[in-house]
Image (cartoon, helix red, strand yellow):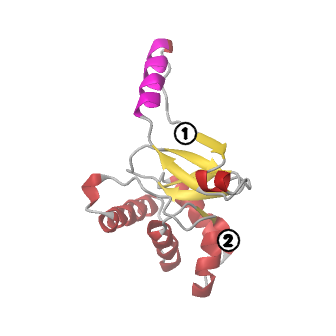
Amino acid sequence: MSDRKELVYFPTWTAGRLGYAVRMREVFQEYLKSKDQHLTQQRQTILDHLLRAEKHLSQDDIYQALRGDGIGKVTIFRTLKMLEDCHLVTRVTAPDSRPRYEVTKERPHHDHLVCLSCGGITEVQWPEVERIQETTCKRYGFAVVYHRHELFGHCQDCQAKGN
């Protein structure tokens, strides 16, 4: 997989990723407080790692990066579950069937192109597709709660390499 940035869509109100990170820490802390839990240093470190990431991360990616800080696999698993429960983090399907994670709270809606060869994930926005979905749902009286598109194929680089 290439080292290119995968996470590209961030809200404009944030004054960049730093402002976004501050807001997401506040959201997580509020969620934990509502569950009578605390924002421990380990949970903070896991969230911060996700917020600094330039790509979608697997549980193992997070573990490999943070095990030197004494953070174990179980803590990462439980923290990711909490982050999903409070709608801060979303799973993206990877070609190896292991989920990858991205912080999505308050980020602009986007979908994913997933390369089956290198595992790279490209974020895309399709206003035309969104309009078609909206029109179709109105026609059928369907109330969408959420949706996601993940298209699987081969990226331009892998195609050029013959993959």
Tell me residue 90's x, y (percent): 54, 52
Q: For mark 2, does the 10 Å Cα neighbourhood hold few (<14), some (14 to 19), or many (20 or more) residues?
A: few
Label 2 residue SS: helix
Mark 2: which amino acid? Answer: Val
Mark 1: which amino acid? Answer: Arg
Identity of the residue drawn at 57% across and 86% down: 69
Q: Nearer the viewer, residue 113 or 139?
A: 113
Q: Which mark is residue 148?
A: 1
Q: For mark 1, does the 10 Å Cα neighbourhood hold few (<14), some (14 to 19), or many (20 or more) residues?
A: few
Q: Is residue 26 left or right of residue 81?
A: left
Label 1 residue SS: loop
Sequence-wise first label, 2 or 1: 2
Q: Which mark is residue 74?
A: 2
Q: Is residue 113 above or below residue 69?
A: above
Tell me residue 84's x, y (percent): 54, 54
Q: Nearer the viewer, mark 2 or mark 1?
A: 1
Identity of the residue drawn at 29% across and 65% down: 19
Q: Nearer the viewer, residue 70 or 34?
A: 70
Tell me residue 64's x, y (percent): 64, 77
Is 136 within the magenta?
Answer: yes
Q: Is residue 137 left or right of residue 10?
A: right
Q: Nearer the viewer, residue 51 or 33?
A: 51
Q: Is residue 137 above or below residue 62?
A: above
User: Where are the magenta residues, as a range?
Assistant: 127-139
Is 24 within the magenta?
Answer: no
